[in-house]
Image (spheres, rainbow, N blue to C red):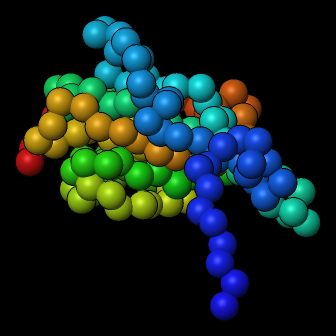
Amino acid sequence: MRQLKVEELSAEGFRWFGTYISLKEVFTDKEFNSDWTFELYRSDNLTMSLGKLNTTAAFSFGLLKKRPMVVDQLQAHCHTEKTMMVEKDSILVVAPIVVGNIVGEEKARAFFVPGGTLFKLNFYTWYSIPFIVGSESALLAQCEAVRTYSADTNFYTLKEQLQLVV
């Protein structure tokens, strides 16, 4: 049996096989802006070609801060799907698009999402940034088509705020 020595992970040593990102490095020594409830660190931290599909997936990471459970704005992506995972328990608010780009706010729903659950949002799903339950802050990881945040993000201000009841 041949022995294989285990190496420390490094950009130089791993470059022929791929790339990586250390979440410990992303969030080390970051000062959280106390006025923000969500802070995205370096959008598109890590990208991945989807080969013959002729598109690129982008992974981004953010820090969520506990905030009042009131929804006044939703966002949607009409041309891309999105996956997200929050490290701690959270609440996700979603609503369908009913006609064109109109939000079916009367059909909005709120779901309790256990920490560490990976979920996918379909095309044309309006959603709010998740609300954290039982913690002051949590890491959010997301994957979507590269530059979705600038090319395919629509915002909608609700006619009436939604107060979440847990």
Q: Position of residue 75 (x, y in %)?
A: 49, 35
Camera-nearest residue between 160 and 90: 90
Residue reaching furthest to the bottom: 1
Q: Is residue 145 left or right of residue 128?
A: right
Q: Is residue 83 visible?
A: yes
Camera-nearest residue between 91 and 12: 12
Camera-nearest residue between 97 and 94: 94
Q: Position of residue 122 (x, y in %)?
A: 55, 59
Point 22% across, 39% down: residue: 132
Point 62% across, 56% down: residue: 7
Q: Is residue 29 left or right of residue 115?
A: right
Q: Quadrant of residue 63?
A: top left
Point 50% across, 30% down: residue: 26
116 w.r.t. 1: above or below: above
Q: Is residue 128 visible?
A: no
Q: Is residue 23 left or right of residue 4?
A: left
Q: Position of residue 46 (x, y in %)?
A: 67, 42
Q: Position of residue 55 (x, y in %)?
A: 83, 53
8 w.r.t. 156: above or below: below
Count of marks placed on residues: 0
- Which image quarter is the N terminus in? bottom right
Q: Is residue 37 left or right of residue 43?
A: left
Point 32% across, 26% down: residue: 72
